[in-house]
């Protein structure tokens, strides 16, 4: 079957179409995306303006038509911090649904962390044992860790690369004072989160998802995307720290000329590097492995799982269900998963 998933993020709106059968890995068929920074449409009260809503609705309509023209049998749509944290997010979702017929599902930050973790788990399999995953978005930073399909701890904090750039790094290049102040802020926020993972011990595998981690790894010498998803890509802390210092001294124009950095993301790659560097330092890890699957793939996998469970006839005396996949949440340590 062909399934489409529409991701309304902080920097881009992205439709991914994949083909898969129950039990088989999803294979990308086509993509359709556009840069759209909804935060640039926020007014003084934190509301997404009419112009921003119009841009969003226009793309959602495009995405639905694209999916229909390519014979998608199912269509999922979700949004993250850009709409979740706006003062009129509910009104925007209602208008999108009314004018396009698409029901955008709002994911919480902890749900983002958990569903992304599920995609990482599927990519690496059970042999990887305990996984700690980091994901840097435009508005938030997600952390998740566990040994099962869903994480035991999943957290989201307001350390997105776009958010931090707007709030802390106004110069081009930013002043050394502002970079130092941002470092202190990032570490202060993470120091409140890291202890919540302590009872899980040392992870067997530490991974990074998101465009920011891919860009940082590419700058540090990892293989380009053209080499394909099965090439191992690693980002070492020693290289990351070096690049964080270099990026702090570079203009946005110079950053945009670096391998793996687009013009859209050049302004915020420094903030992303500072978040990644602090996370690795405070968690005490020396490197992360870049996982090609992330939130979109996690959402797709959940839907495919649901369809597979529905299609399989239960064994006598057994009950096969998937309700737990529809209620992803942060699980307190004392409950387990």
Image (spheres, helix red, strand yellow):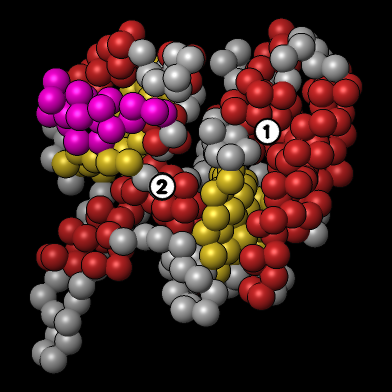
Q: Residue at 77% x, 45% y: name it.
A: 187
Give percent across and percent down for residue 10. Answer: 47, 27
Looking at the image, residue 255 lies above or below residue 310: above
User: Farthest residue in the bottom direction?
Assistant: 317
Looking at the image, residue 234 lies above or below residue 69: below
Quarter of the figure with residue 86 = top left
Q: Residue at 52% x, 79% y: name it.
A: 334
Work out whether residue 100 can be spotted.
Answer: no
Q: Is residue 88 magenta?
A: yes
Q: Which residue is mark 1?
A: 272
- The residues bearing labels 1 and 2 have C-alpha atoms spaced at a distance of 21 Å
Side of 108 where 186 appears, left or right: right
Side of 299 where 60 appears, left or right: left
Q: Which residue is mark 2?
A: 108
Give percent across and percent down for residue 145. Answer: 57, 63
Instruction: Give the crowd class for mark 1: few <14, some 14-19, many >=20 residues within 10 Å.
Output: many
Q: Residue at 58% x, 72% y: name it.
A: 129
Looking at the image, residue 333 lies above or below residue 115: below
Give, as a single range, the part of the protein colored magenta: 86-104
The main secondary structure of the magenta stretch is: helix
Helix, strand or loop status at disc 1 = helix
Side of 267 where 242 appears, left or right: right
């Amino acid at each position: 079957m062909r399934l489409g998933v529409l991701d309304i993020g902080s920097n881009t709106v992205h439709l991914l179409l994949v083909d898969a059968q129950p039990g088989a890995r999803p294979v990308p068929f086509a993509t359709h995306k556009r840069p759209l920074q909804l935060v640039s449409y926020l007014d003084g009260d934190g509301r997404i303006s009419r112009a921003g809503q119009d841009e969003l609705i226009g793309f959602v309509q495009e995405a639905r038509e694209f999916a229909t023209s390519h014979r998608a049998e199912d269509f999922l749509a979700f949004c993250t911090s850009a709409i979740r944290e706006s003062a009129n997010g509910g009104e925007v979702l209602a208008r999108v649904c009314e004018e396009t017929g698409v029901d955008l599902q709002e994911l919480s930050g902890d749900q983002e962390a958990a569903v992304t973790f599920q995609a990482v788990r599927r990519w690496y399999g059970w042999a990887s044992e305990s996984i700690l995953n980091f994901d840097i978005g435009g508005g938030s930073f997600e952390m998740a860790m566990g040994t099962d399909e869903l994480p035991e701890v999943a957290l989201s904090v307001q350390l997105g690369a776009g958010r931090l750039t707007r709030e802390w790094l106004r110069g081009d290049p930013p002043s050394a004072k502002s970079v130092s102040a941002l470092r202190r802020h990032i570490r202060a926020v993470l120091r409140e989160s890291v202890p919540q993972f302590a009872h899980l011990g040392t992870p067997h595998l530490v991974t990074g998802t998101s465009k920011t981690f891919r860009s940082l790894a590419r700058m540090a010498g990892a293989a380009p995307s053209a080499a394909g998803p099965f090439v191992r890509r690693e980002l070492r802390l020693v290289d990351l720290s070096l690049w964080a210092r270099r990026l702090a001294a570079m203009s946005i124009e110079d950053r945009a000329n670096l391998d793996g950095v687009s013009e859209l993301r050049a302004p915020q790659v420094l903030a992303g590097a500072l978040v990644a560097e602090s996370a690795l330092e405070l968690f005490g890890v020396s490197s992360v492995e870049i996982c090609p699957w992330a939130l979109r793939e996690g959402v797709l996998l959940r839907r495919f799982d649901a369809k597979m469970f529905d299609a399989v006839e239960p064994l006598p005396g057994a009950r096969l269900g998937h309700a737990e996949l529809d209620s992803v949440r942060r699980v307190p340590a004392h409950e387990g998963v």
